[in-house]
């Protein structure tokens, strides 16, 4: 049996707080409430600790807050800044989202976009932990302190990362072995409601549904019946 913990439990200098432990995280990425609720149902049925990185206001936040097994984090989107389209500053983006989730202590930005110049913005918003690096498949992940004292907990596995790998053959990752293997390192797992709802097995499936993201009935008809993101999560949760 493996133990799932919250990000806020992680202390890099106290090995017992993270060695061999796992963190389950969800980037909600503006998912339709029906799609998000489907993910919540899956995790509540397993009665496991999890972190939901929030992108927007939704009535489901109260349900998440009412479950002591869940923690809420910030998932700011800085992509418009990179495209030169943003009217708001990085500080405004972080602070606006912090008003939606004022209790958040952990942050992961959309697409893991970040900057050393923004670390202090995170801390000023009440953040103590960040998870903004993808070390895909690395079995020796060690949390560490950023220069301003924030605790960084890198991601070991991301469902969209595996989908990208399958499209680009970028890295080698034996899902059946690595996803469930025990390890002395910290393992942070990251999933997305849309991929869980679709049971995505490749990026092409997601591309085909982009015009139906607000139509959960149509999305469910497009769910993959084989081995995909949803079954990967189910396999992980069966370990508890």
Image: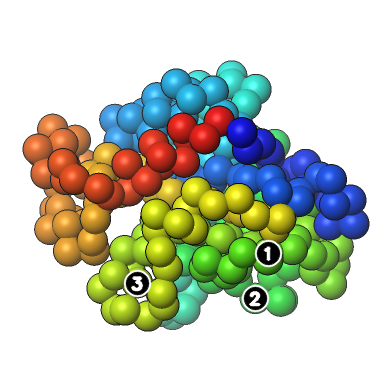
For residue 32, which quarter of the picture?
Answer: top left
For residue 23, which quarter of the picture?
Answer: top right
| Residue depicted at x 55% and y 43% | 24
Question: Which quadrant is home to the N terminus?
Answer: top right
14 and 53: which is toward the camera: 14
Horizontal side, residue 15 vs residue 40: left or right: right
Total marks in image: 3
Which comes sooner in the sequence, label 3 or label 2? 2
Residue hosting label 1: 141
Relative to 101, does residue 80 appear above or below in the rendering?
below
Question: Mark 2 packing: few (<14 Cα in 10 Å), some, or many (20+)?
Answer: few
Relative to 8, does residue 211 appear above or below in the rendering?
below
Which comes sooner in the sequence, label 2 or label 1? 2
Residue hosting label 2: 115
Residue hosting label 3: 165
Q: CA distance from mark 2 to mark 1?
A: 21 Å
**Front disc: 3 or 2:** 3
Question: Mark 1 packing: few (<14 Cα in 10 Å), some, or many (20+)?
Answer: many
Residue 124 in sight here: no
Q: CA distance from mark 3 to mark 2?
A: 25 Å
Question: Which quadrant is home to the C terminus?
Answer: top right
């Amino acid at each position: 049996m493996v133990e799932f913990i919250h990000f806020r439990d992680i202390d890099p200098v106290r090995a017992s707080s993270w060695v061999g432990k796992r963190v389950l995280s969800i980037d909600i990425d503006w998912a339709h409430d029906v799609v998000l609720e489907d993910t919540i149902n899956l995790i509540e049925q397993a009665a496991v600790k999890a972190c939901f990185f929030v992108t927007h206001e939704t009535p489901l936040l109260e349900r998440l807050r009412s479950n002591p097994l869940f923690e809420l984090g910030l998932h700011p989107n800085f992509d418009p800044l990179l495209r030169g389209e943003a009217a708001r500053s990085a500080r405004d983006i972080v602070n606006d989202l912090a008003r939606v989730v004022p209790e958040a202590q952990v942050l992961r930005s959309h697409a893991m976009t970040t900057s050393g110049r923004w670390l202090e913005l995170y801390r000023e918003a009440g953040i103590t932990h960040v998870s903004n690096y993808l070390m895909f498949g690395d079995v020796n992940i060690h949390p560490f302190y950023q220069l301003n004292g924030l605790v960084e907990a890198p991601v070991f596995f991301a469902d969209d990362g595996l989908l990208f790998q399958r499209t680009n053959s970028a890295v080698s990752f034996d899902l059946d072995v690595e996803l469930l293997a025990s390890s002395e390192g910290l393992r942070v797992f990251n999933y997305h409601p849309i991929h869980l709802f679709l049971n995505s097995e490749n990026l092409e499936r997601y591309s085909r549904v982009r015009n139906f993201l607000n139509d959960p009935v149509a999305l469910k008809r497009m769910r993959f019946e084989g081995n995909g993101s949803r079954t990967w999560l189910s396999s992980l949760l069966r370990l508890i």
